Amino acid sequence: MAFRRAITKRLIDGYKCLRPSNTKILRHYMTSSNLTDPIMGIRIESIALPRREEETAVKGLSVSETKKLLRMYQMEKVKARLRDIPKNSVSYWEFVQICCETCGNNDEQGSLMAQSLDHAGCVVVLGDIVFLHPHQIAKSMAAMINRTSALPNDPRKEELAQLETTKKCIDIKARRIVQAELYCGLGFLAAQTIGLMRLTFWELSWDVMEPICFFVTSLHFLLGYYFFLRTSTEPSFEGFYQQRFKTKQKKLMESHGFDFLRYTELNSLFTPLACKSEVSTV
């Protein structure tokens, strides 16, 4: 009991020197029956130094953020150099060299930069060729898909049907005009033959008409040869008919505002197995 009263007196004398948090130890001692706990508590609290709160304020950028900004700067610099190239494509070796020069002649960083640009879609690498304008390739692919893909309810089918109807009317009209010209030619040849016969047997003699018929035949040969030079077609009745038909067809299409290129495109899209000879070229 005397030992306990001495310790209690010592604690009361040093009560004012203790921090507010140490009053819990005194209260614990006053209610505890074990003397070892308060003694160990007093020694630990008296020896331990108060902890200081660490300041966590970040000044500037971290290393990873700095590398990220540097990489972005290098990538934009490479893009600017690629935009200055007038060509649409370069070799992969030239592309890697540009990346290496931008990265300070570092081959490893240049190769990584080239791979990053390829993965990001800034360029398109196909084998040993690098296409510098991916948006142009995307537009070409979209146009190709639209041209080669036909849906069941595609509105272009109606447009093709209208064009086919217009073309049939134009072909019929052109065929009638050409047939009329051929009938006129038949009448001219018949009149020429009758005239030569009249001159040979009634008006003049064969001695006079023989050289005239020779020169008339030579004139027909010259006209056939000229027709071959202009059209690269054999001077025959069928060749003359086809050339006159195409000429009249072209004039009628222009007068009716018929888009023959659009008709050919739609016809090849919806009838890909059709023979090319079925579509007349203008």
Image (spheres, helix red, strand yellow):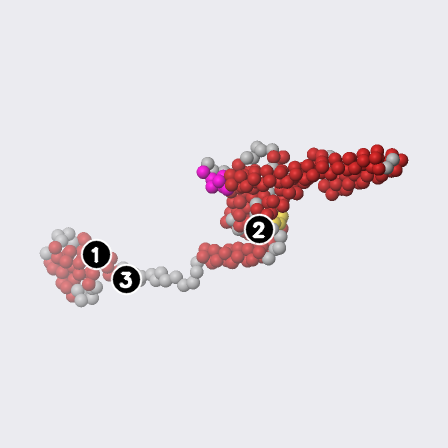
Q: Quick one: 183 or 172, which is closer to the camera? A: 183
For the N terminus, which image quadrant?
bottom left
- First reached walking from the N terminus: tag 2 or tag 3: 3
Left or right for 264, reference 23:
right
Spot the residue most to the bottom.
16
For the C terminus, which image quadrant?
top right
Is disc 1 in contact with disc 2, using a CB cutoff of under 8 Å?
Answer: no
Image coordinates for residue 35, horizontal then vertical, percent:
16, 54
Q: Rounded to the nearest whole Å, what is the CA distance between mark 1 and mark 3?
A: 15 Å
- Residue at image mark 3: 50
Left or right for 98, reference 237:
left
- First reached walking from the N terminus: tag 1 or tag 3: 1
Q: Residues within 10 Å of mark 2 (few under 14, many from 20)?
A: many
Is disc 2 in contact with disc 3, using a CB cutoff of under 8 Å?
Answer: no
* Residue 19 seen in the current view: yes
Assign a secondary structure to mark 3.
Answer: loop
- Residue at image mark 1: 41
Q: What amino acid type should be assigned to the residue bearing mark 2? A: Leu
Assign a secondary structure to mark 2.
Answer: loop
Q: Rounded to the nearest whole Å, what is the CA distance between mark 2 and mark 3?
A: 64 Å
Q: Quick one: 22 or 74, which is closer to the camera? A: 74
Q: What amino acid type should be assigned to the residue bearing mark 3? A: Pro
Q: Quadrant of residue 166?
A: top right
Residue found at x 61% / y 55%: 85
Q: What amino acid type should be assigned to the residue bearing mark 1? A: Gly
Mark toward the viewer: 1 or 2:
2
Residue found at x 68% / y 37%: 183
Whether residue 155 appears in magenta in the rendering, the answer is yes
Instruction: Specify start and end residues of the magenta stretch as a single range.
Output: 153-159
Residue 132 is marked as 2
